Image (cartoon, helix red, strand yellow):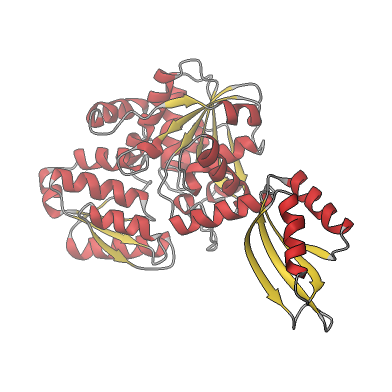
């Protein structure tokens, strides 16, 4: 059996990449701490040059290539963050890079990867399709295939995060990080457990693709059916052959989070912490906020692993979050279809201190009687209590209405 990545490999990786990859801050979050029931520190890997931790492993791999391997160039498959990390450092080191990305990769990640100087090939519906195409192209061209997570040098590079956390927060009780293929969590777990075994290691997967959790429970690696998730950075259907033994040996707990929980964590980090996290980047925080782990009253470092989120998706998350919190509401209101009726309704809304952002009249649908109309009004409000107060005012004024959810 081949040896696993060890802490000495991670220490050597740290020496290699030092000065070329930023030591990201690990700062306390009072907001997350209060909500999670733990003392929480955020390891902000979204502040890296390429917006993700992935450049650690990519750079370490590039720096260990032989001269003839560098000359042949590299190729990889990635949903985006590994692509950007490899593209950026390959260009900096003068190594030609080709990146295969799934067809539906967010535009922000495709554009950034191209901008760093790599050739981007869009292929397949998911990471697995893209990886198969990258393998085929590597065999044809002789390029070095750099796996996004199932590579010892990549794992060692990601593990440097664990060493940094131990130095930045030496009294940490637990570290929680997202997990897709296992390169990040496997590397961190190895670095931490081999240095300080008392620290608890927790992994977080999206409930839609819990590939590593299933592999641990079943005792074998299998490929899950395709599934869509806003946490595209950890949307891995099959865990790594090299990472699974590390996770099995060093990780104490793996939990899953739902899509809405990830979305609410993205919104909280943006609004309260002023930090932008993508779906995968917010997964660890989501698990803490929704009490998915066994951690309680502990000093916890949560890895915010990336911030490369598509702005269209971010816009939808913000809007849905406002609706969920009661800060945006849409009411369907019946009123007489005669001059002045709308003005009277608007007066009630004005007195209720709500702000109208959108209206839509309809006289033909929703079972409207002749001589009546229905109007859908979307309003900005201050929260759930404000919405209830506004609806009470409408009831008292005799307006039939429904809340649209």
Quick check: 63 above or below 109? above
Quick check: 178 above or below 358? above
**In this view of the protein, can residue 90 be seen by the observer?**
yes
Q: Quadrant of residue 126?
A: bottom left
Q: Is residue 375 left or right of residue 243?
A: right
Furthest-front residue in view?
340
Q: Position of residue 399 (x, y in %)?
A: 84, 64
What residue is at 72 percent from the left and 60 percent from the top? Answer: 346
Q: Considering depth in this image, is 272 or 12 the residue closer to the camera?
A: 272
Quick check: 153 above or below 200? below
Q: Is residue 17 left or right of residue 69?
A: right
Q: Quadrant of the N terminus?
A: top left
Q: Considering depth in this image, is 387 or 165 the residue closer to the camera?
A: 387
Q: Position of residue 306 (x, y in %)?
A: 42, 43
Q: Position of residue 82 (x, y in %)?
A: 34, 48
Q: Is residue 225 left or right of residue 292?
A: left
Q: Considering depth in this image, is 360 or 198 the residue closer to the camera?
A: 360
Q: Quadrant of the C terminus?
A: bottom right
Quick check: 96 above or below 11? below
Q: Is residue 160 left or right of residue 228?
A: left
Q: Quadrant of residue 130?
A: bottom left
Q: Considering depth in this image, is 168 or 313 the residue closer to the camera?
A: 313
Q: Position of residue 288 (x, y in %)?
A: 61, 35
**In this view of the protein, can residue 258 be seen by the observer?**
no
Count of marks placed on residues: 0
What residue is at 37 percent from the left and 60 percent from the top? Answer: 107
What residue is at 51 percent from the left and 34 percent from the top? Answer: 273
What residue is at 31 percent from the left and 52 percent from the top? Answer: 83
């Amino acid at each position: 059996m081949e040896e696993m990545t060890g802490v000495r490999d991670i220490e050597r990786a740290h020496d290699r990449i030092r000065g070329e990859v930023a030591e990201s801050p690990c700062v306390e979050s009072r907001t997350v701490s209060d909500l999670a029931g733990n003392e929480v520190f955020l390891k902000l890997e979204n502040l890296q040059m390429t917006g993700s931790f992935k450049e650690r492993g990519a750079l370490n791999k590039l720096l260990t290539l032989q001269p003839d391997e560098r000359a042949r160039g590299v190729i990889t498959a990635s949903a985006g963050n590994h692509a950007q990390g490899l593209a950026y450092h390959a260009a900096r080191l003068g190594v030609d890079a080709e990146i295969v990305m799934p067809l539906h990769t967010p535009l922000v990640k495709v554009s950034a990867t191209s901008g760093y100087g790599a050739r981007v090939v869009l292929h397949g519906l998911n990471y697995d399709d893209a990886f198969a195409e990258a393998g085929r192209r590597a065999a044809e061209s002789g390029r070095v295939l750099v796996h996004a997570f199932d590579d010892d040098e990549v794992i060692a590079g990601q593990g440097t995060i664990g060493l940094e956390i131990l130095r930045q927060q030496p009294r940490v009780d637990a570290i929680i990080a997202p997990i897709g293929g296992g390169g990040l969590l496997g590397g961190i777990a190895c670095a931490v457990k081999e240095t300080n075994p008392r620290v608890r290691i927790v992994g977080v997967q999206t409930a839609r693709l819990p590939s590593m959790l299933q592999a641990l429970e079943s005792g074998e690696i299998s490929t899950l059916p395709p599934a869509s998730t806003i946490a595209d950075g950890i949307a891995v259907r099959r865990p790594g052959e090299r990472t699974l033994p590390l996770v099995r040996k060093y990780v104490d707990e793996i939990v899953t989070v739902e899509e809405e929980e990830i979305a609410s964590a993205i919104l909280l980090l943006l609004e309260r912490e002023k930090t932008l996290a993508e779906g995968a980047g917010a997964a660890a925080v989501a698990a803490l906020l929704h009490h998915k782990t066994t951690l309680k009253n502990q000093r916890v470092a949560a890895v915010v692993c990336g911030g490369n989120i598509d702005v269209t998706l971010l816009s939808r998350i913000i809007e849905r979050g406002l609706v969920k919190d009661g800060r945006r509401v849409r009411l369907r209101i019946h009123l007489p279809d005669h001059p002045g009726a709308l003005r009277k309704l608007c007066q009630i809304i004005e007195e209720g201190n709500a702000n109208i952002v959108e209206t839509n009249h309809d006289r033909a649908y929703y079972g409207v009687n002749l001589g009546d109309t229905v109007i859908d009004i979307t309003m900005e409000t201050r929260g759930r209590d404000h919405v209830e107060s506004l609806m009470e005012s409408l009831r008292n004024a005799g307006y039939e209405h429904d809340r649209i959810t």
